[in-house]
């Protein structure tokens, strides 16, 4: 699956240049035109890396960066700040508010791609493979624990296995057949009916609130773990 890069930039020429460069390297590109749209896109799209312009309409890049770093869900998101300002003080401020890197425009295409790939590698190597995350949900497979925005949640063994299956299939539909076989096993299939799985999903949604709204019902098929619906 292609890694997703969110570009928050209001200059169309810069957007199209970055889009072409990134897509040529196999990345999926999402674009936001101002700071507020950028924050919303981070929550909705869950990018692997953010390219953030310093000067934006409304919220500027510094404030966007501050807000993302204060949020536990996005505190570790790699952020590369872009700016036409090359002064050392501007770079220092950008790095102090939480940017991982600072790239001066106009930039070299090779340098941009090299830095993006470098930060993605660094982030992946630092991410524990025993953790599953989606929004504010975090599952620790070693400790058999689940937290919602840092607060522990008590799940039964079956609820834990069901949530694990949904997390591993995040963004895709997990069919009832798949969930039956994954959670209850082939030999238990005759003991499980549609009502049983619905009851477990309902319980999961309640226990994971407000993140439980990420579990979407796909009529006559199964369930999908996705984004929280807009209010």
Image: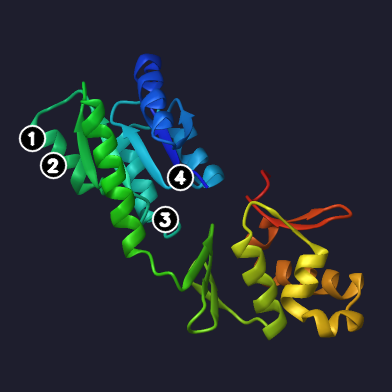
Alpha carbon distance from label 4 to label 1: 31 Å
* Whether label 3 touches label 4, CB < 8 Å: no
Q: Which mark lies nearer to you, 4 or 1?
A: 4
| Mark 3 surroundings: few (<14), some (14-19) or many (≥20) residues within 10 A | few
Residue at 49% from the left image edge and 43% from the top image edge = 2
Label number found at residue 92: 2
Residue 48 against residue 223 in the figure, above or below: above
Reading the image, the residue beneath label 1 is: 88
| Mark 1 surroundings: few (<14), some (14-19) or many (≥20) residues within 10 A | few
Q: Nearer the viewer, residue 231 or 76?
A: 76
Question: Which tag, 3 or 4, sits closer to the chain's start?
Answer: 4
Question: Which tag, 3 or 2, sits closer to the chain's start?
Answer: 3
Q: Which mark lies nearer to you, 3 or 4?
A: 4
Q: Which mark lies nearer to you, 1 or 3?
A: 1
Alpha carbon distance from label 4 to label 2: 28 Å
Is there any visible trace of residue 57 in the rendered image?
Answer: no
Q: Position of residue 5 (x, y in %)?
A: 42, 39
Reading the image, the residue beneath label 3 is: 71
Alpha carbon distance from label 2 to label 1: 6 Å
* Whether label 2 touches label 1, CB < 8 Å: yes
Question: Which tag, 1 or 3, sits closer to the chain's start?
Answer: 3
Relative placement, left or right, of 185 versus 25 is right
Q: Quadrant of residue 93?
A: top left
């Amino acid at each position: 699956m292609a890694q997703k890069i969110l570009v928050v930039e209001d200059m169309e020429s810069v957007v199209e240049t970055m889009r072409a460069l990134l897509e040529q390297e196999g990345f999926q590109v999402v674009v936001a035109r101002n700071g507020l749209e950028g924050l919303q896109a981070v929550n909705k799209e869950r990018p692997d890396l953010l390219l953030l312009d310093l000067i934006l309409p409304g919220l500027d890049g510094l404030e966007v960066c501050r807000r993302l770093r204060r949020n536990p869900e996005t505190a570790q998101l790699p952020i590369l700040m872009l700016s036409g300002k090359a002064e050392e003080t501007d770079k220092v401020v950008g790095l102090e508010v939480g940017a991982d890197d600072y790239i001066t425009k106009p930039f070299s295409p090779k340098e941009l791609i090299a830095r993006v790939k470098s930060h993605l590698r660094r982030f992946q190597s630092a991410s524990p493979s025993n953790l599953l995350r989606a929004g504010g949900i975090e599952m620790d497979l070693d400790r058999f624990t689940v937290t919602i925005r840092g607060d522990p949640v008590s799940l039964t063994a079956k609820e834990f296995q069901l949530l694990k299956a949904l997390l591993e299939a995040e963004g895709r539909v997990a069919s009832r057949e798949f969930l039956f076989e994954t959670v209850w096993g082939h030999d238990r299939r005759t003991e499980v009916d549609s009502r049983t799985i619905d009851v477990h999903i309902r319980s999961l949604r309640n226990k994971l609130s407000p993140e439980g709204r990420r579990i979407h019902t796909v009529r006559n098929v199964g369930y999908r773990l996705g984004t929280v619906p807009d209010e």
